Image: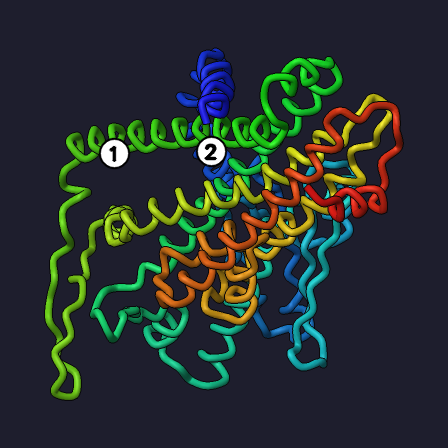
Amino acid sequence: MNKIKIIIKREYLSRVRKKSFLVMTILGPLLITALWLVPFFLSHTSDSQSRIIVVDETGEAEPKSESLFKNKIKSNEEVKIEYMDDITAAQTLLKAESCDAVLEIIRTNDMPPIKSFWFYSNHEPSLRAQTNVETQLTTLFKDYYLKYNCGVPEEDIAFINNPKIDFYSKNILTGEDSYKEIKTGLGAICGFLIYFFIFLFGSQIIRSVSEEKMNRIVEVLVSSVKPAQLLTGKLIGVALVGLTQFLLWIVLTFIVITAVQSAMPQKFSAPQKEEITINERVISVDKLQDDENVQVSQIIQGLFSINYVAVISMFMFYFIAGYFLYASLFGAVGSLLDVDTDGQQFTIPITIPMMLALICIPMVMNNPSGPVAFWLSIIPFTSPIVMMIRIPFGIPVWEIILSVSLMLITICGCLWLAAKIYRTAILLYGKKITYKEIWKWLRYKN
């Protein structure tokens, strides 16, 4: 046991003392936040405003008729709308690249009696610009039809276009609000962090083991300790590094949140409640406000509605469990590597389950209680990611117990498997290793 402690201390201190550890501890939360926020802001930022020329010919079919869309399609931050009467002149400007697109609208005998043509030259405008114009066309045509063909008053048309419906999502057992969007985002972040941590620290194991083997350092080490003790010490040492970094992240996050809460206490205040009576039932809901910052307040309240004790405790368990599950296999793969050995044939099969879980994240986020989410959260090789996505929504205790039990059993099997492979392969040089050879090692008796 003392030898294992020495190995743990060596692996832990050698990584914690590196400058990269301090840098990642401080910049890690910022980088992960940027990874999620930057694409969001970029998707809502238009690179440039597209100049669109509209030629409305709907009034030409009937001489006494007015054009349906002329001067009604509006410019905004995505498109700059200009109007012309001559399609030939508009297309000439387009060919000369004086505009980005030409929209020609004509009236036909079809149903609906409108056809539009979107002409572009060398550079097609963005999809958002095209969708923006198409949406305006659809709304204008609908308004025209409702007003002149159905006789609907303008105020009713305005209500149809912008209906105001108060939608509440509440748990009937607890009476709490859902905040599904917040829980979905938190679950996705937790799942991604689990994936990131497992492969970050798992790759350190495979690199450490393979480097010691190729440099022949392991020959000196195994003269003093057993191979199984050496592997165990490495796994625990690197796991402690990961836990240290994660706990520091929690402390830094708590400090930042406390500072922000002190600076903007009104944002973190509890929402005002009101009681509404429906069919002799009294339901407590958040009082509707007209404040433009109400959405920000709802997001903050949604974040505070989550049971972080359960989320953090389960995160730590699945991080440690998922790490030991995959790091043990990575350690076995590291012992198989040699100068002439192709490691991809061994690493790819191990990474496939995690990649599958990552690919299925959108499906799980869409339906956290569905059969796909359930089975992926039960299977040990995918449960670290998928279960963390489901935890914020609240799941039955028996599912957690089943997932944890299967995870622990699988970890024991993987550790046994890795120890058998590591003990034989760590001192094996210059031999091409196949799966058939590995199967023979597993059948060896101690």
**What secondary structure is marked by label 1?**
helix
**Which of the numbered marks, if any, corresponds to residue 147?**
none
Circle 1 is placed at which residue position? 257
Q: Position of residue 308 (x, y in %)?
A: 29, 48
Query: Residue 358: in sight, yes or no?
Result: yes
Mark 2, other Cα within 10 Å: few <14 / some 14–19 / many ≥20: few
**What secondary structure is marked by label 2?**
helix
> What amino acid is at disc 2?
Ile
Residue at the extreme bottom: 279
| Tag 1 and tag 2, C-beta contact below 8 Å | no
Query: Residue 80: in sight, yes or no?
Result: no
Rendering quarter of residue 276: bottom left
Q: Earlier in the sequence, mark 1 or mark 2?
A: 2
Circle 2 is placed at which residue position? 32
Find the distance from the CA under tag 1 to the CA under tag 2. 16 Å
Residue nearer the viewer, 266 or 350 = 350
Q: Is residue 376 above or below residue 163?
A: above
> What amino acid is at disc 1?
Ile
Q: Position of residue 3 (x, y in %)?
A: 49, 21
Query: For the C terminus, which image quadrant?
Result: top right
Q: Is residue 178 above or below residue 415?
A: below
What's the residue at 89%, 32% (across, down)? 432
Residue nearer the viewer, 18 or 163 = 18
Count every numbered label the image shows and give the total.
2
Left or right of 275: which side holds 245? right
What's the residue at 11%, 66% (across, down)? 274
Residue nearer the viewer, 317 or 123 = 317
What's the residue at 29%, 29% (across, down)? 251
Q: Position of residue 386 (x, y in %)?
A: 51, 55
Left or right of 395: which side holds 357? right
